[in-house]
Each structure stands twice: as structure tokens, then as C-alpha cells.
Amino acid sequence: MENRQIESTPIKFPIQAAINVRLNNLLLNKTDIFSFAAGEQHFVRFRMRPTDSSMQVNCPISLTLELGNTTAGLWLSEWPMPEHIRHFVPDGLLAQLPENLAISIIESALAPLLQQAELALGLKVTVQATAAETHSPVYNMPFGFDLQIVNREDESIQQTITALLMLDPHLYLHIQERLRHWPSDNNPDWEEHHTPLWLEISRVVFTMQEINQLNPADLILLDDTRFETEGLLKLRLNSGYYCEASLNPTQPTTLTINTEWMTMTDNEQKQNIDHISQIPVQLSFDVGEKTLSFNEVRQLRPGYVLELGKSLPEIIQIRSQQRLIGTGELVEINGRVGVRILNLFNKKAKGS
């Protein structure tokens, strides 16, 4: 085969500051509409949305704002409530006024919006200039939102305004804290996402070599289990989180949650491995599983009673990395609890 020199060009992904990505992700889940009064005749519907600086070309109006002790740029697709501006100056003449006078008129005309912005941000908001810098090195964190100006009497929409606020990145932590109090969006599909819960009674760590030496009918002692004496289980998620629950003795088809969610400890020893046979493998021993919606999983907390729908099976599931590799049965060995392997990697014990 003839060798040919192939020229390749690396694919470069758009560079986006990490802090902008975080704000983008926050805004994706904060799209609930908030309404507030804007004078006697109108109210405003406000909705946040993720965006980027390219929106500036669609917004011919810009202002430089002072937010607390930082500077920001605001871009608008049109003036909100232009009739308020017309109280002070005829159409088209605002741009011809001295900047100090124009700023005074803008702050007076847009007072209801600026006051609401101060309440929402927890910062003093003032207009500094009647134009903003398009590619500012100071304010470059994009925050998008839409405004609808609505008539109070018949709720007809008078204006729909697209807006872009470019913030100083130093404000991120402050914005993050303010958004924490804003309701997050619900995703019905995700709420109903099927989430398996494994009902674990214990787990054991073997090396690869020890796993390969296991055979059907072998006995495995379980050191960390209170299932037989107290009916205690761990409800384990695929992510590694778990909570403890007790099987109700009078109603063996129900479990009562005992703890909050915790992180499953990694019992695999951290040591140098000289051979593949020494790789540790963690086995879990489960008495079945229960599938819940994600919304139901979120409700699990101490005191919650979970209905299993049926009694627990007598067959123990042996899993590694959540995958079923065998089955067994609980046995007592000299006063201790163990599992007798019935099937492992499709090999069955004689007589099973």
C-alpha cells in the first residue's frame, strides 16, 4: 500500500470563558416569566434567557450602566415605553440632546424598569452613558432577557423587546446567588425518567485472580450486613449514591427510609498493581431492584415508606459494576451470614 503524506488541520472549537458557560447553564433553567407593574396603564413580563454577544447587532440602542461598583453594557432592540420618553422630548430628538440631559430623561422615563432591576439585582443601577462599548474588555459576560409591555386593561401586548446585558465577570457570584431564589424550570420528561434502585445487603472486594477461582457452590462470607438481623438494606443508585432503609417486619413488601443520601465508599484498596490478576473487583449482593421515576427518587428521605409491590425474592443477585454476573442464596455459616453461589458467569452449581 502506497504511503501518502496527509495534511491535517486541527479543528478549533469556539473559545468561551468558563464563567460565561456557567451563567449560560444557569439561565437555561431559569426561564419562568416574572410580571411587575410599570405605571398605571401597563405591566411588564420579564423572561431571562441564555445568549451571547452576537445579539448586539440586533439591538440598535445601547447604554452604559453602573451596577453597584461595576460597569455594564445594555443593548435594546427598541426603547421600552417610548411614550414615557415623549413626555420629555419629541420623537427623534433624544439623540440630539447633550448627554447629561439625555441620561436624566432616560432615567426618569424608565424609572419603573430601573427600580425593578435594582430590586432584582440588589444593586444600585444608574445610566452612565448613552452608548456602550461593543467589545468591552471590562463587561463581557452576556445575560439575555426579553420584555413584553402589556396593557393592563385588556392584556394586549404593546411591545416585545429583546435585550442583552453585558456584565463584569466579577458579578458572577452575586448573580449566581440572586438566581438561586429564582424558580427553576421543570422538565416533565426528566421527572418521569426511569431510575433503577438496587436493594443491596452487602458488598465484598476480590482480586481478579480470586474472582476467576470462584465456582458455583462456593460460599462467600458477608462481613458488613445487618439484613438477616435487622432487615437493613442499602438503596443504591447507579451513580454510587445510596440511602439506608429497613424492611418493615409486619409489612415485608414495604421499606422505610432511614437516612439521607450518602456517597458509597470505595472499599477497593489504593495500591500499586503489578499484574492484571491483582486488579480489585467489587461485588455487590442484592435482593432485587425497584424502578422509580426521578421525581419519586427526589422524594426519598428519612421516614418515607417505599412500596415494593411484592415480597423480596429469595435469590441473591451478584453484581459487578451494576452488571449481573451471577446468583446465590443466603446461608448461615457458624453464626455468620454468607452467600452460596448458585450461578456465576453462566456456570451453575450441580443440582441447581
Image: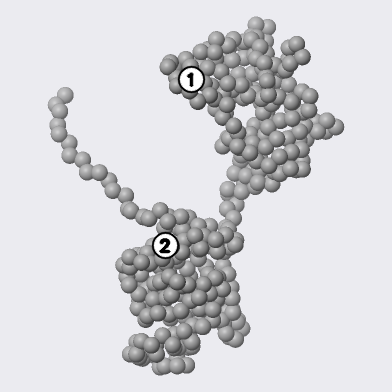
In primary-sequence order, the first of circles 1 and 2 is 2
Q: How many numbered tags mark residues here?
A: 2
> Identity of the amino acid at label 2?
Pro
Q: Where is residue 311 drawn, in percent x and y? A: 77, 29
- Mark number, residue 279: 1
What residue is rendered at 53% in x and 74% in y? 118
Q: Nearer the viewer, residue 320 or 171?
A: 171
Q: Is residue 296 left or right of residue 57?
A: right
Q: Nearer the viewer, residue 113 or 121?
A: 121
Q: Where is residue 120 drawn, in percent x and y? A: 55, 70
SS under mark 2: helix
Q: Is residue 313 above or below residue 239?
A: above
What residue is rendered at 77% in x and 14% in y? 335
Residue assigned mark 2? 169
**Location of residue 62 (image quadrant):** bottom left
Label 1 with label 2: CB-CB less than 8 Å: no
SS under mark 1: loop
Q: Nearer the viewer, residue 250 or 157?
A: 250
Q: Taking the image as drawn, is residue 133 in sight?
A: yes
What residue is rendered at 56% in x and 37% in y? 239
Q: Is residue 293 above or below residue 129?
A: above
> Identity of the amino acid at label 1?
Ile
Q: Where is residue 85 drawn, in percent x and y? A: 45, 88
Q: Is residue 80 left or right of residue 218?
A: left
What residue is rendered at 53% in x and 24% in y? 269
Q: Taking the image as drawn, is residue 46 in sight?
A: no
Q: Quadrant of the N terminus?
A: top left
